[in-house]
């Protein structure tokens, strides 16, 4: 059994691999909980759905279309981690501001969200 738990990651969008410079993160689809407090104490909590997310710092190779990445919707994103986990976002969309690329090191940060982000 390997003790490797971090250090490399792979990212694919609809089966196509992309260069990942680092800083991959994820949040599984789950519920957001908020504690409900009254003047007489804690009453319980409220629960609402929360989207899952996969984001990473990528590297813009010459063949990568930043326009296609910015416009991506209904995509399947897979993040494979050094610890053996696979995080999969189905029917995902690029969220947040349009993709911005640094000319200094050709990196960008992108985030995809979905109601269906699971751990495999």
Image (cartoon, rainbow, N blue to C red):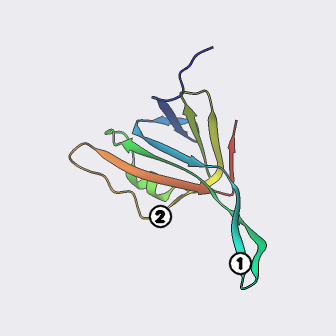
- What secondary structure is marked by label 2? loop
Query: Residue at coordinates 22% horizontally, 49% vertically from top-left?
Result: 103
Instruction: Residue 109: give x, y in percent of width and height.
Output: 40, 51
Task: Report the residue marked by disc 1.
Answer: 37
Residue 83 shows in the view: yes
Query: Residue at coordinates 31% horizontally, 39% vertically from top-left?
Result: 62
Q: Which mark is residue 62?
A: none
**30 horizontally vs 113: left or right:** right
Q: Say which of 107 and 32 sits in front.
A: 32
- What secondary structure is marked by label 1? strand
Residue 68 shows in the view: no
Instruction: Residue 73: give x, y in percent of width and height.
Output: 57, 57
Q: Residues within 10 Å of mark 1 (few under 14, many from 20)?
A: few
Q: Which mark is residue 96?
A: 2
Q: Is residue 101 above or below residue 49?
A: above
Q: Residues within 10 Å of mark 2 (few under 14, many from 20)?
A: few
Residue farthest to the bottom?
Answer: 39
Query: Residue at coordinates 57% horizontally, 33% vertically from top-left?
Result: 80
Sequence-wise first label, 1 or 2:
1
Q: Which quarter of the image is occupied by the N terminus?
A: top right
Residue farthest to the left?
Answer: 104
Q: Is residue 81 above or below residue 110?
A: above
Q: Which quarter of the image is occupied by the C terminus?
A: top right
């Amino acid at each position: 059994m390997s003790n490797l738990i971090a250090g490399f990651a792979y990212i694919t969008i609809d089966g196509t691999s992309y260069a990942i410079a680092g800083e991959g993160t994820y949040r599984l689809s789950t519920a957001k909980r908020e504690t409900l407090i009254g003047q007489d104490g804690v009453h319980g909590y409220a629960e609402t759905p929360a989207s899952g997310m996969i984001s990473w710092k990528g590297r813009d190779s010459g063949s990568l279309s930043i326009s296609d990445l910015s416009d991506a919707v209904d995509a399947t994103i897979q993040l494979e981690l050094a610890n053996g986990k696979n995080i999969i976002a189905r029917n995902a969309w690029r969220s947040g501001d349009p993709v911005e690329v640094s000319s200094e090191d050709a990196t960008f940060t992108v985030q995809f969200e979905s109601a269906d982000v699971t751990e495999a």
